[in-house]
Amino acid sequence: MTDSSTSAPTPDRAMPERLDPVVWRPLTLLLRDLDDQIASLYTGAGIEGVKPRYSLPLVWLDQDGPLAIRALAERCDVTHSAMSQTVSAMRDADLVRSASGPDARTRLVELTDRGRSLVAYLADEWNATEAAVRELEAELPYPLTRVVDDLHAALARRSFRDRVAARMTLARPDDAGTAGPSS
């Protein structure tokens, strides 16, 4: 029997009493649902093993490749570590391969034939997604892009990390045994 307090919460299961799911969780669930809906387009088109997060790197590789992971990460505005993990997953899906770079330390990422064959579809989906977001914005009392810009401005004044840390009651995991319940 699984203890429901330790299993991962799902949208149809209540959150444990100690957690406040009012703001952050619905946002993360919405973003995951939007990505899942895009992924379902891929599956419906007979494309297996491709995730929405692969679209931008694959398009960049088609336009500018082969590229080193660091250059690809910069173009996609993600960390080197995140792009390294994405490249590994794309390699497993036979979308990219690694080749020797100009020196022994550099590996270049390039499209496979399968990856190249999907770029036009993925670019089309990307542009259609942007158009769908603009359509959604027109239905809202304020644009999503304004919310994002306003959030960036607020986070420039005080980082999200600092905001979360200021509200935490425990400094370290081992403090849990000595601290009383938070109010």
Image (tube, rainbow, N blue to C red):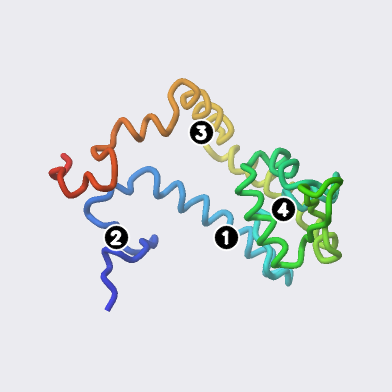
Dot 1 or dot 4, earlier in sequence: 1
Would residue 18 appear left or right of 161 to someone viewing this image? left
Q: Nearer the viewer, residue 16 or 66?
A: 66
Q: Nearer the viewer, mark 4 or mark 3?
A: 4
Helix, strand or loop status at disc 3: loop
Dot 1 or dot 3, earlier in sequence: 1
The residue sitting at 67% across, 60% down in the picture is 88
What is the crowding at mark 2: few (fewer than 14 residues within 10 Å), some, or many (at least 20)?
few
Disc on res. 14: 2
Dot 2 or dot 3, earlier in sequence: 2
Place residue 54 in its image quadrant: bottom right
> x%, y% of residue 15?
29, 57
Inspect the image, locate mark 1, and give the three-letter code of the amino acid beneath it: Asp
Q: CA distance from mark 1 to mark 4?
A: 14 Å
Would residue 141 appear left or right of 168 to someone viewing this image? right
Q: CA distance from mark 2 to mark 3?
A: 30 Å
Q: Quadrant of the N terminus?
A: bottom left
Would residue 160 appear left or right of 128 to someone viewing this image? left
What is the crowding at mark 4: few (fewer than 14 residues within 10 Å), some, or many (at least 20)?
many
> x%, y% of residue 2?
29, 74
Disc on res. 55: 4
Helix, strand or loop status at disc 1: helix
Place residue 94 in its image quadrant: bottom right
Q: Nearer the viewer, residue 19 or 86?
A: 86
Q: Is residue 120 visible?
A: no
Q: CA distance from mark 1 to mark 2?
A: 21 Å
Residue at the far top: name it: 157
Inspect the image, locate mark 2, and give the three-letter code of the amino acid beneath it: Ala
Dot 4 or dot 3, earlier in sequence: 4
The residue where tag 1 is placed is 36
Helix, strand or loop status at disc 4: helix
Dot 4 or dot 2, earlier in sequence: 2
